[in-house]
Amino acid sequence: MLIFDTLALFDKYWYHSPMQSRYKYFPISAAQSSWGLYITCAGHGRSEPNAVFPSHAHPDQYFFSWKVGRILREWQIILICDGEGTVEFKSRRSRVRKGSLIVLPPGCWHRYRPNPKTGWTTLWIGFGGELAARILGGAGFGPDGEVRDIEEARRLHQLFAGTVSYILDNGQTAVFSAAARIPMLVAAIIEDCPSNKEQTANADLVRRAQTFIAENSAGIVDFASLAESLGIDYRSFRYLFKKETGFSPLQYQLAVRLTRAKNLLRSSDMPVSEIGSTLGFNSTWYFSRFFRQQTGMPPITYRKKHTGE
C-alpha cells in the first residue's frame, strides 16, 4: 500500500469521516505456529450511537455479552479512533476515549463497549504465538490487560492504521510478512507511549548512565558517584540499571570493552598489549584472560579466525 493510502485511512478514521467496516479472520497453519508469531484477525469499524454491541457478524469465539464478558486465547490490541466507552478487566474498570489503546492478553477476562450516546470507531489486530508473549512482555504488558493513552502519538496512530491495512490486504497471502509487522508496532508503543512517567524517567536515567559508561569505558568509573550525579542512591541505581539492560553497571562496562576489543582485533593491526592498555586493562595477561573467559579463545586466535591472518 502506498504511503498516502495509509495516511488516507488514518485521516478518515481520526477525523470522523464515515467509512465502511472491514475485517478478516485468518486460519493458522502449522508453519505459522512453529514460527512463533501469527495474525488471527484485523479490522476497522464503526459502532453507531445506540447500536447493538458487539455485532453478531463476528465468529462465535469472538462474540461476547456484557453480562458474561470474554476470555481470548490470543493477544488483541484495539485503538479507539473516536467516541468513548468503557473497558473492564477482572479487578478494574477504565473509561476509554479517542486515543485510548486497549491491550488484551490471552487468558485475561474482559469486556468493553462504547458509550451509547457517542458510539465509537476502532482499529484492531489479533495475534498469537510464543514470540508474541516475549514481545509484549518486553513492552511491559502483563497478563491482566491494560489501557494506555496515545492521543498525542500521531506516528503510532498512522503505523497502527497502516498495519491494519496491510494485514487486510495481504494477510491471506503474505502471512509471515503480515505477522512481522507486529514487532514494529509494539516497538512504536514502547517508544511513544510507555506505561507511566516513572518508567520513562527510569529508562532515561539508565540511558544517560549507559552513555557515560560507554564514553569512559577504558577508565575507572565510580558508579556510586555516577548514581549521585543522576540524583539516585547507588542501590536503586544498580537495580534499575540491571532491570533495563540485564547487566550490572560493571558488567556493562566490561561488555563495552569486550565489544571494542573485538572490533580492534578485527579491523586494526594494533598489538594485543596495546589494545588491552587502550581499553583500560592493567596488563596484557589480565586482558587476555578476560577475553578468553568471554569468548572461549585468546585474542590472537580470535584475530586469526576473523581476519585470516
Image: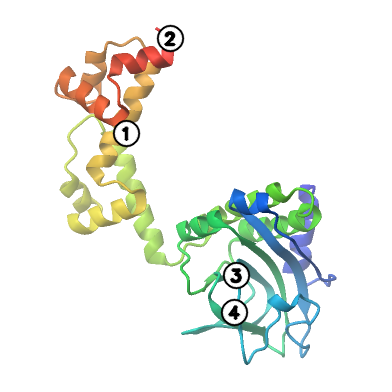
On the image, the x and y values in percent for residue 263 come to: 38, 22
Q: Earlier in the sequence, mark 2 or mark 4?
A: 4
Where residue 116 is drawn, which disc sits there? none
Q: Would you say the residues marked 4 and 1 are in contact, meaning their CB atoms lie under 8 Å apart?
A: no
Helix, strand or loop at label 3? It is loop
Q: Which residue is mark 2?
A: 308
59 or 33: nearer the viewer:
33
Q: Is residue 47 above or below residue 26?
A: below
Residues at marks 1 and 3, CA–CA distance in whole angstroms:
41 Å
Q: Amino acid at mark 1?
A: Val
Nearest to the observer: residue 199 or residue 300: 300
Label 2 crowd (10 A; few <14 / some 14-19 / many >=20): few
Residue highlighted by disc 3? 73
- Work out which quarter of the rendered image holds the C terminus and state it: top left
**x, y percentage for residue 30?**
67, 53
Mark 3 to mark 2 CA distance (whole Å): 52 Å
Q: Amino acid at mark 2?
A: Gly
Name which of mark 3 and mark 2 comes first in the sequence.
Answer: 3
Q: Which kind of residue does numbered mark 3 sit on?
A: Arg
Nearest-to-viewer mark from 3 and 2: 3
Which residue is identified by label 4?
96
Say whether marks 4 and 3 touch (CB < 8 Å).
no
Q: Work out whether 288 lies above or below 56.
A: above
Q: Residues within 10 Å of mark 4 (few under 14, many from 20)?
A: many
The quarter holding residue 275 reads top left
| Up-down relation of residue 161 to residue 216 (above or below) | below
Q: Position of residue 199 (x, y in %)?
A: 39, 62
| Mark 1 lies on residue | 256
Mark 1, mark 3: which one is toward the viewer? 3
